Amino acid sequence: MMQVSVPDVSSRSLTELISLSGRRAVVTGAARGLGRAIAGRLVEAGADVLVADIEDELATAAAKDLGARGQGRAVAAQLDVTDADSVAAAADLALRELGGLDIWINNAGIFPAVPALEMSGETWDEVFAVNARGAFLGAREAARRMSEAGHGGVIVNVVSTAGFRGTAPGLAAYVASKHAARGLTRQLALEFAPFGIRVLGVAPTFVPTEGNMAAAAAAGIPMDSETIMSVMQPGPLGRLGVPDDIARVVLFCASDLSAFMTGSTLLADAGETA
């Protein structure tokens, strides 16, 4: 196997370093929330993006909107990250529709709140199927195609501050799955480095999105409860995060600004984990 080295980009301008023009990306869980914000920034930076989500109609609407506002193209795809065939099909669709694959963002995640003493094995397995196995399947299929093309690439796993510590009650499966995703990031960085593929993690704090608000409601947690409000307390920087706060960090990871980085998980948490 020939070693593929990441390029020395020292001579490039800042405009060139942040540009994703000519690059092809897949973002999972991209129909709303963090995923949509991430896809939007990648399209704005010039990438052609596969907006992949298990909710097909939402993905189609998001792709239409993002494609009209950015420099790159946005193409919708239905994707179940727990299904290996579905993940492989999305990777192949990126090759056909976008012409290649340079960036893969594992963003899809779930976070049901169930006290550990009441949690079923099925719920535990479901969380790991999406948050850990889904990240592995996405990274594997992306790396297979990137290595075959011989040009390297970038894989970004959206982890969580829960990958560094415990968090709110009822999230044992979520916390464990995000520790797994963080460990996976470090290991795959080692295994994929010879192919010129960088693997990075981004660990957001709790950011209010449609998805986690719906999860709170499904768990019967009112928005004014002590549990939710304790999670949503502003960090040392003085305000709650918004999806674009996370999307900008992912853009940094996906771009050549981070060309000499791999294996790290960057905290995007306003300093709360320090």
Image (tube, rainbow, N blue to C red):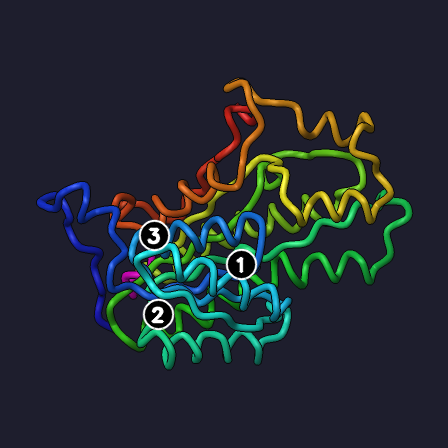
Q: What residue span does the magenta drawing correspond to? A: 194-198
- Residue 103 % position (x, y): 37, 61
Question: Image height check: is 224 above or below 92?
Answer: above
Residue 128 counted in the magenta span = no
- The residue type indicated by label 2 comes to Leu
Distance of label 1 from label 3 (alpha carbons): 15 Å
Image check: 205 left or right of 49?
A: right
The amino acid type, in three-letter code, at marker 1 is Ala
Q: Residue at x 60, y 37 (%)?
A: 207
- Label 2 close to label 3 by CB (< 8 Å): no
Give whichever of 191, 50 is nearer the camera.
50
Q: Real-space Cα distance between discs 2 and 3?
A: 17 Å
Residue 7, by quadrant, is bottom left
> Please, what is the three-letter code of the amino acid marked with disc 3?
Glu
| Residue 194 percent coordinates (x, y) | 29, 63
Residue at 47% x, 69% y: name it: 140
Q: Residue 96 at what x, y percent from top left? A: 37, 81
Residue linked to disc 2? 101
Disc 1 versus disc 2: distance between alpha carbons?
17 Å
Q: Which residue is mark 1?
A: 30
